Image (cartoon, rainbow, N blue to C red):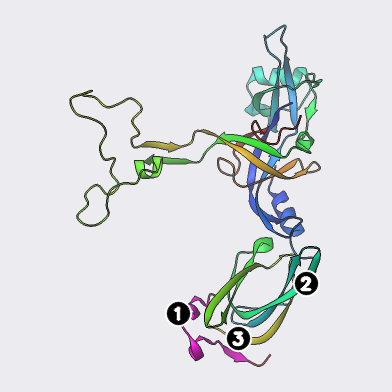
Amino acid sequence: MSSTILKTLDTENRKKAPLTSFAVGDSIKVMVKIKEGDKERVQAFSGTVIARKGSGATETFTIRRISFGEGVERIFPVNSPSIAGIEVETVGQKRRAKLYFLRDRSGKTARTATQQA
Amino acid sequence: MQGLLGKKLGMTRIFNDQGHQVPVTVIACGPCTVLQCKTKDHEGYDAVQLAFGDTTEQRMTKAAMGVCKKLSVKPLRYRCEMAVEAGDELKPGDVVTVKLFEGVPFVDVAGVSKGKGFAGVVRRYHMSGGPMTHGGHSKRRVGSVGCRELPGRIHKGKRMPGHLGAERVTQQNLQVVKVRPEEHVLLVRGSVPGHTGTVLIVKKSLKRGQTK
Protein backbone atom coordinates (compact mmCIF):
# COMPACT_ATOMS: atom_id res chain seq x y z
CA MET A 1 0.00 0.00 0.00
CA SER A 2 2.77 2.40 -0.82
CA SER A 3 3.18 4.90 -3.59
CA THR A 4 5.65 2.71 -5.50
CA ILE A 5 2.89 2.46 -8.07
CA LEU A 6 3.12 6.22 -8.60
CA LYS A 7 6.83 5.79 -9.32
CA THR A 8 6.10 2.92 -11.69
CA LEU A 9 3.53 5.05 -13.53
CA ASP A 10 6.06 7.85 -13.71
CA THR A 11 8.68 5.58 -15.28
CA GLU A 12 6.18 4.12 -17.73
CA ASN A 13 5.02 7.50 -18.91
CA ARG A 14 8.47 8.79 -19.70
CA LYS A 15 9.79 8.74 -23.24
CA LYS A 16 11.67 5.60 -24.06
CA ALA A 17 14.43 7.55 -25.77
CA PRO A 18 15.08 10.83 -23.99
CA LEU A 19 14.90 14.07 -25.94
CA THR A 20 17.90 16.11 -26.90
CA SER A 21 18.82 18.00 -23.78
CA PHE A 22 17.95 21.66 -23.78
CA ALA A 23 17.70 24.36 -21.18
CA VAL A 24 15.78 27.53 -20.48
CA GLY A 25 17.06 30.30 -22.72
CA ASP A 26 17.86 28.06 -25.67
CA SER A 27 16.27 28.56 -29.04
CA ILE A 28 14.90 25.24 -30.10
CA LYS A 29 12.84 23.68 -32.85
CA VAL A 30 10.20 21.19 -31.74
CA MET A 31 9.04 18.68 -34.29
CA VAL A 32 5.37 18.09 -33.53
CA LYS A 33 3.50 15.14 -34.97
CA ILE A 34 0.13 16.19 -36.32
CA LYS A 35 -2.59 13.80 -37.32
CA GLU A 36 -4.80 14.78 -40.24
CA GLY A 37 -7.28 12.03 -40.88
CA ASP A 38 -5.19 8.92 -41.37
CA LYS A 39 -2.07 10.79 -42.34
CA GLU A 40 0.54 11.94 -39.91
CA ARG A 41 2.93 14.76 -40.64
CA VAL A 42 5.52 16.68 -38.71
CA GLN A 43 5.28 20.38 -38.09
CA ALA A 44 8.04 22.44 -36.58
CA PHE A 45 7.52 25.00 -33.85
CA SER A 46 10.60 27.02 -33.08
CA GLY A 47 11.21 29.63 -30.42
CA THR A 48 12.84 30.37 -27.11
CA VAL A 49 12.40 28.08 -24.14
CA ILE A 50 11.18 30.38 -21.37
CA ALA A 51 10.31 27.83 -18.69
CA ARG A 52 10.61 24.23 -17.66
CA LYS A 53 8.12 23.18 -15.02
CA GLY A 54 7.47 20.09 -12.97
CA SER A 55 9.49 16.93 -12.75
CA GLY A 56 9.44 13.35 -13.90
CA ALA A 57 6.92 12.20 -16.45
CA THR A 58 4.76 15.29 -16.06
CA GLU A 59 7.45 17.86 -16.77
CA THR A 60 6.53 20.54 -19.28
CA PHE A 61 8.33 23.30 -21.13
CA THR A 62 7.09 26.57 -22.57
CA ILE A 63 8.24 27.94 -25.88
CA ARG A 64 7.75 31.53 -26.93
CA ARG A 65 8.08 32.92 -30.39
CA ILE A 66 7.02 36.04 -32.20
CA SER A 67 4.75 35.09 -35.04
CA PHE A 68 3.60 37.85 -37.42
CA GLY A 69 4.31 40.43 -34.74
CA GLU A 70 2.27 38.58 -32.16
CA GLY A 71 3.77 36.67 -29.23
CA VAL A 72 2.82 33.01 -29.28
CA GLU A 73 3.52 30.51 -26.51
CA ARG A 74 3.09 26.77 -26.55
CA ILE A 75 3.40 24.42 -23.63
CA PHE A 76 4.60 20.89 -24.36
CA PRO A 77 4.91 17.94 -22.01
CA VAL A 78 8.55 16.84 -22.20
CA ASN A 79 7.47 13.23 -22.49
CA SER A 80 4.70 13.81 -25.02
CA PRO A 81 4.51 11.05 -27.63
CA SER A 82 3.56 13.68 -30.20
CA ILE A 83 7.01 15.24 -30.08
CA ALA A 84 9.07 13.62 -32.82
CA GLY A 85 12.27 15.37 -31.87
CA ILE A 86 13.96 18.55 -30.78
CA GLU A 87 16.73 20.53 -32.42
CA VAL A 88 18.69 23.05 -30.41
CA GLU A 89 19.34 26.01 -32.67
CA THR A 90 21.24 28.28 -30.30
CA VAL A 91 22.27 27.82 -26.70
CA GLY A 92 21.24 30.79 -24.62
CA GLN A 93 22.83 32.38 -21.62
CA LYS A 94 20.41 33.13 -18.84
CA ARG A 95 20.42 34.21 -15.24
CA ARG A 96 16.95 33.10 -14.27
CA ALA A 97 15.05 29.84 -14.22
CA LYS A 98 11.98 31.39 -15.81
CA LEU A 99 12.27 33.98 -18.57
CA TYR A 100 8.78 35.42 -18.21
CA PHE A 101 10.21 38.94 -18.45
CA LEU A 102 10.63 38.35 -22.18
CA ARG A 103 6.87 38.75 -22.49
CA ASP A 104 7.13 42.41 -21.64
CA ARG A 105 9.91 43.04 -24.11
CA SER A 106 9.93 43.41 -27.82
CA GLY A 107 12.46 43.70 -30.60
CA LYS A 108 16.13 43.38 -29.83
CA THR A 109 15.75 43.37 -26.06
CA ALA A 110 13.53 40.31 -26.31
CA ARG A 111 16.46 38.15 -27.34
CA THR A 112 18.49 35.99 -25.02
CA ALA A 113 22.26 36.29 -25.10
CA THR A 114 23.66 33.37 -27.01
CA GLN A 115 26.77 31.34 -26.71
CA GLN A 116 28.19 29.26 -29.49
CA ALA A 117 26.90 25.74 -29.23
CA MET B 1 -20.84 -7.18 -7.00
CA GLN B 2 -21.29 -3.45 -7.26
CA GLY B 3 -17.99 -2.13 -6.01
CA LEU B 4 -14.96 -2.32 -3.81
CA LEU B 5 -13.15 -0.52 -1.04
CA GLY B 6 -9.98 1.33 -1.90
CA LYS B 7 -7.47 3.89 -0.83
CA LYS B 8 -6.47 7.08 -2.58
CA LEU B 9 -2.76 6.99 -3.42
CA GLY B 10 -2.40 10.31 -5.21
CA MET B 11 -2.70 11.96 -8.58
CA THR B 12 -0.58 12.12 -11.69
CA ARG B 13 -0.93 12.47 -15.43
CA ILE B 14 -0.57 9.76 -18.00
CA PHE B 15 -0.59 9.70 -21.78
CA ASN B 16 -3.49 7.99 -23.50
CA ASP B 17 -3.53 6.26 -26.89
CA GLN B 18 -4.02 9.55 -28.69
CA GLY B 19 -0.94 10.95 -26.99
CA HIS B 20 -2.99 13.31 -24.87
CA GLN B 21 -2.23 13.80 -21.21
CA VAL B 22 -5.00 12.64 -18.90
CA PRO B 23 -5.18 13.68 -15.25
CA VAL B 24 -5.73 10.56 -13.17
CA THR B 25 -6.23 9.60 -9.56
CA VAL B 26 -4.44 6.43 -8.52
CA ILE B 27 -6.59 4.26 -6.27
CA ALA B 28 -5.36 1.13 -4.52
CA CYS B 29 -8.56 -0.78 -5.06
CA GLY B 30 -8.99 -4.10 -3.28
CA PRO B 31 -8.33 -6.95 -2.85
CA CYS B 32 -11.42 -7.12 -0.67
CA THR B 33 -12.38 -10.16 1.35
CA VAL B 34 -15.98 -11.15 1.79
CA LEU B 35 -16.62 -11.50 5.52
CA GLN B 36 -20.33 -12.10 5.56
CA CYS B 37 -23.10 -12.77 3.08
CA LYS B 38 -26.50 -11.32 3.82
CA THR B 39 -29.39 -13.06 2.19
CA LYS B 40 -32.99 -12.25 1.51
CA ASP B 41 -34.12 -15.12 3.71
CA HIS B 42 -32.01 -14.23 6.68
CA GLU B 43 -31.47 -10.46 6.70
CA GLY B 44 -34.20 -9.42 4.29
CA TYR B 45 -31.87 -8.24 1.50
CA ASP B 46 -28.94 -9.51 -0.52
CA ALA B 47 -25.54 -7.99 0.23
CA VAL B 48 -22.01 -8.83 1.23
CA GLN B 49 -19.77 -7.36 3.87
CA LEU B 50 -16.37 -6.49 2.43
CA ALA B 51 -13.13 -5.95 4.33
CA PHE B 52 -10.05 -4.19 3.05
CA GLY B 53 -6.68 -2.89 4.24
CA ASP B 54 -3.99 -4.89 6.00
CA THR B 55 -3.49 -4.12 9.64
CA THR B 56 -2.21 -5.81 12.77
CA GLU B 57 -4.21 -7.85 15.22
CA GLN B 58 -3.37 -5.30 17.90
CA ARG B 59 -5.36 -2.63 16.07
CA MET B 60 -8.48 -4.72 15.71
CA THR B 61 -11.34 -5.13 18.12
CA LYS B 62 -11.73 -8.64 19.43
CA ALA B 63 -15.11 -8.99 17.76
CA ALA B 64 -13.77 -7.93 14.38
CA MET B 65 -10.71 -10.11 14.81
CA GLY B 66 -12.94 -13.03 15.65
CA VAL B 67 -14.60 -12.83 12.24
CA CYS B 68 -11.20 -12.78 10.54
CA LYS B 69 -9.98 -15.72 12.59
CA LYS B 70 -13.07 -17.74 11.88
CA LEU B 71 -12.44 -17.39 8.15
CA SER B 72 -8.65 -17.63 8.75
CA VAL B 73 -7.93 -14.40 6.86
CA LYS B 74 -5.42 -11.67 7.72
CA PRO B 75 -6.57 -8.83 10.00
CA LEU B 76 -8.41 -6.33 7.80
CA ARG B 77 -9.12 -2.83 8.90
CA TYR B 78 -11.98 -1.34 6.89
CA ARG B 79 -15.47 -2.71 6.36
CA CYS B 80 -18.36 -1.85 4.14
CA GLU B 81 -21.51 -3.42 2.88
CA MET B 82 -22.00 -3.79 -0.82
CA ALA B 83 -25.06 -4.83 -2.77
CA VAL B 84 -24.64 -7.89 -4.93
CA GLU B 85 -25.61 -8.20 -8.55
CA ALA B 86 -27.53 -10.99 -10.17
CA GLY B 87 -25.32 -13.95 -10.87
CA ASP B 88 -22.83 -13.24 -8.09
CA GLU B 89 -21.88 -16.33 -6.20
CA LEU B 90 -19.89 -15.19 -3.23
CA LYS B 91 -19.26 -16.86 0.06
CA PRO B 92 -17.42 -15.70 3.17
CA GLY B 93 -13.66 -15.86 2.61
CA ASP B 94 -13.83 -15.06 -1.10
CA VAL B 95 -11.51 -12.37 -2.40
CA VAL B 96 -12.68 -9.78 -4.92
CA THR B 97 -10.05 -7.88 -6.85
CA VAL B 98 -9.95 -4.80 -9.02
CA LYS B 99 -10.61 -7.05 -12.04
CA LEU B 100 -14.24 -6.31 -11.19
CA PHE B 101 -13.84 -2.98 -12.97
CA GLU B 102 -12.41 -4.39 -16.18
CA GLY B 103 -14.69 -3.26 -18.96
CA VAL B 104 -16.55 -0.87 -16.69
CA PRO B 105 -16.48 2.57 -18.34
CA PHE B 106 -17.50 4.76 -15.41
CA VAL B 107 -17.41 4.58 -11.62
CA ASP B 108 -18.73 6.55 -8.67
CA VAL B 109 -16.23 7.22 -5.88
CA ALA B 110 -17.26 8.09 -2.34
CA GLY B 111 -15.04 9.24 0.48
CA VAL B 112 -14.60 11.82 3.19
CA SER B 113 -13.53 15.16 1.72
CA LYS B 114 -10.69 17.31 3.01
CA GLY B 115 -11.69 19.42 6.00
CA LYS B 116 -11.63 23.15 5.34
CA GLY B 117 -12.50 24.39 8.84
CA PHE B 118 -14.97 27.17 9.60
CA ALA B 119 -15.73 28.87 6.33
CA GLY B 120 -17.81 31.87 5.31
CA VAL B 121 -20.65 31.79 2.81
CA VAL B 122 -18.57 32.97 -0.15
CA ARG B 123 -16.29 29.96 0.18
CA ARG B 124 -18.84 27.53 1.53
CA TYR B 125 -21.80 28.20 -0.75
CA HIS B 126 -20.18 30.26 -3.52
CA MET B 127 -22.34 33.29 -2.71
CA SER B 128 -21.24 36.38 -4.54
CA GLY B 129 -20.68 38.63 -1.54
CA GLY B 130 -20.87 42.42 -1.58
CA PRO B 131 -18.85 45.06 -3.38
CA MET B 132 -15.16 45.23 -2.49
CA THR B 133 -14.92 48.95 -3.35
CA HIS B 134 -17.13 52.03 -3.53
CA GLY B 135 -17.56 51.98 0.23
CA GLY B 136 -18.82 48.43 0.35
CA HIS B 137 -19.07 47.16 3.91
CA SER B 138 -20.46 43.74 3.19
CA LYS B 139 -17.42 42.49 1.37
CA ARG B 140 -17.72 38.79 2.20
CA ARG B 141 -20.65 39.01 4.60
CA VAL B 142 -23.74 36.82 4.65
CA GLY B 143 -25.98 39.72 3.61
CA SER B 144 -29.68 39.58 4.23
CA VAL B 145 -30.83 36.47 6.05
CA GLY B 146 -34.57 36.85 5.65
CA CYS B 147 -37.73 38.90 5.78
CA ARG B 148 -39.30 41.30 8.33
CA GLU B 149 -42.12 40.76 10.75
CA LEU B 150 -43.52 38.03 8.57
CA PRO B 151 -42.36 35.33 9.27
CA GLY B 152 -40.26 37.08 11.96
CA ARG B 153 -37.71 34.33 12.00
CA ILE B 154 -34.95 32.96 9.83
CA HIS B 155 -35.99 30.28 7.38
CA LYS B 156 -34.84 26.81 8.26
CA GLY B 157 -31.85 25.68 6.27
CA LYS B 158 -30.67 29.25 5.58
CA ARG B 159 -27.12 28.94 4.30
CA MET B 160 -24.72 30.49 6.76
CA PRO B 161 -21.03 30.27 7.71
CA GLY B 162 -19.92 27.05 9.33
CA HIS B 163 -17.80 24.00 9.02
CA LEU B 164 -16.84 23.07 5.46
CA GLY B 165 -15.51 19.76 4.25
CA ALA B 166 -14.68 16.58 6.15
CA GLU B 167 -17.98 15.07 5.09
CA ARG B 168 -18.89 12.15 2.88
CA VAL B 169 -18.89 13.15 -0.76
CA THR B 170 -19.62 11.02 -3.81
CA GLN B 171 -18.02 11.93 -7.09
CA GLN B 172 -20.13 10.43 -9.85
CA ASN B 173 -19.32 9.29 -13.38
CA LEU B 174 -15.55 9.17 -13.20
CA GLN B 175 -14.07 7.57 -16.26
CA VAL B 176 -12.01 4.44 -15.68
CA VAL B 177 -8.74 5.08 -17.46
CA LYS B 178 -6.94 1.87 -16.62
CA VAL B 179 -7.23 -1.22 -14.45
CA ARG B 180 -3.97 -2.77 -13.29
CA PRO B 181 -4.83 -6.08 -11.65
CA GLU B 182 -1.23 -7.07 -10.81
CA GLU B 183 -0.81 -4.02 -8.61
CA HIS B 184 -4.47 -3.88 -7.48
CA VAL B 185 -4.67 -0.40 -8.86
CA LEU B 186 -7.42 1.54 -10.56
CA LEU B 187 -6.83 4.76 -12.46
CA VAL B 188 -9.79 7.11 -12.79
CA ARG B 189 -9.93 10.37 -14.67
CA GLY B 190 -10.06 13.47 -12.51
CA SER B 191 -10.06 13.94 -8.77
CA VAL B 192 -11.73 12.01 -5.98
CA PRO B 193 -12.73 13.23 -2.50
CA GLY B 194 -10.25 13.40 0.34
CA HIS B 195 -6.52 13.47 0.87
CA THR B 196 -3.97 10.84 -0.07
CA GLY B 197 -4.70 7.81 2.08
CA THR B 198 -8.45 8.41 2.30
CA VAL B 199 -10.49 5.21 2.30
CA LEU B 200 -12.82 5.22 -0.67
CA ILE B 201 -15.81 3.26 -1.82
CA VAL B 202 -15.60 2.69 -5.56
CA LYS B 203 -18.78 1.55 -7.24
CA LYS B 204 -19.86 0.95 -10.78
CA SER B 205 -21.51 4.12 -12.01
CA LEU B 206 -25.14 4.47 -11.12
CA LYS B 207 -25.99 6.77 -13.98
CA ARG B 208 -23.52 6.31 -16.79
CA GLY B 209 -22.11 3.53 -18.90
CA GLN B 210 -24.23 0.73 -17.52
CA THR B 211 -24.65 -1.71 -20.33
CA LYS B 212 -27.59 -4.10 -20.59
Extreme residue toward the left, this view: B149
Q: Secondary structure at mark 2?
A: strand
Q: At 17% from the left edge and 25% from the top edge, which residue is drawn?
A: B149
Where residue B21 sits, quadrant-wise, is bottom right
Q: Is residue B5 magenta?
A: no
Q: CA distance from mark 1 to mark 2?
A: 34 Å
Amino acid residing under circle 3 = Gly
Q: Position of residue B32 (x, y in %)?
A: 73, 30
Q: Specify whether disc 1 shares its chain with disc 2.
A: yes
Q: Secondary structure at mark 3?
A: strand
Residue beneath disc 2: A41
Instruction: Specify start and end residues of the magenta stretch as a single range.
Output: A98-115
Nearer mark to the viewer, of 1 and 2: 2
Identify the chain of the residue marked 3, using the numbered disc in the image. Answer: A
Mark with earlier residue (1, 2): 2
Identify the chain of the residue marked 2, using the numbered disc in the image. Answer: A
Q: Which mark is residue A104?
A: 1
Nearer mark to the viewer, of 3 and 2: 2
| Vertical arrangement, residue A29 with respect to residue B192, above or below | below
Residue beneath disc 3: A92
Q: Are marks 3 and 2 in contact (CB under 8 Å)?
A: no
Quadrant (top left/top right/bottom left/bottom right) for the C terminus of chain A: bottom right
Q: CA distance from mark 3 to mark 2?
A: 29 Å
Q: Specify whether disc 3 shares its chain with disc 2.
A: yes
Mark with earlier residue (1, 3): 3
